[in-house]
Amino acid sequence: MIFKFIIKIFGRIIGLYARIRDYLYKQYYRANGIEIGKSTYLSPKAYIDLHKPGKINIGENCYITRNVVILCHTDTHKGGPLGIWEKDGEGREFGSVTIGDNVFIGVNSVVMPGVSIGNNVIIGALTLVNMDIPNGKIVAGVPAKIVGLTENHIKDFL
């Protein structure tokens, strides 16, 4: 009896810790200019790029899972730390990212700068999103390809 009580209290403490951690995590990103909609979950293991002038806007009721990377800059034209490919110090490129409402981004996916993801989109695990995704699509792969419709996926489970 005492053991069950201790386990129950311990579980509540862990749950409270998780809610506080998630709240502080979102507040940190919001304080740094990231827009995050209501009821959106960000895994503590997700990485959201804070480089300016790129901007990231995440809609409502989204699920950003473990090890997802959302980028708003790239140094691919820089030429390494020495900047050997730069012209007039401009090797870094920026692009804003917009993620619509009701979007699921699977484990270990990467969203590249300048991408816009519509509403009701499912992005499979290990997907490289380097193109705009229209509303209601399921995408997967490297690079991302449309593999289905969210509407059909939902019908299978209702």
Image (spheres, rainbow, N blue to C red):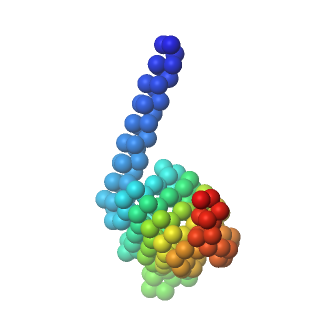
Image-based side of 114 in relation to 24, left or right = right
Which residue: 61% across, 65% down?
155
Q: Position of residue 100 (x, y in %)?
A: 45, 71
- The quarter of the picture where residue 68 lies is bottom right
Residue at 40% x, 69% y is 57
Quick one: which residue is furthest to the left in this view? 31
Which one is nearer the viewer's eye here, 13 or 26? 13
Look at the picture and state if 105 lies above or below 77: above
Q: Provide residue 10's location: percent of width, then percent of height.
A: 46, 26
Q: Nearer the viewer, residue 15 or 26?
A: 15
Q: In the image, what residue occupies the spot 41% across and 47% down?
A: 22
Q: In this view, does 68 lie to the left or right of 28?
A: right
As drawn, the residue found furthest toward the front would be: 158
Is 72 located above or below residue 40 in the figure?
below
Q: Which residue is drawn at 54% across and 55% down?
A: 65
41 versus 114 height, above or below? above
**Percent x, y for residue 46?**
51, 56
Residue 22, visible in the rendered structure = yes
Q: Nearer the viewer, residue 114 or 123?
A: 123
Q: Is residue 144 visible?
A: no
From the viewer's side, name the closer residue of 138 and 143.
138
Left or right: 108 in relation to 95: right
Question: Which quarter of the figure is the C terminus placed in?
Answer: bottom right
Which residue appears farthest toward the bottom when viewing the image? 87
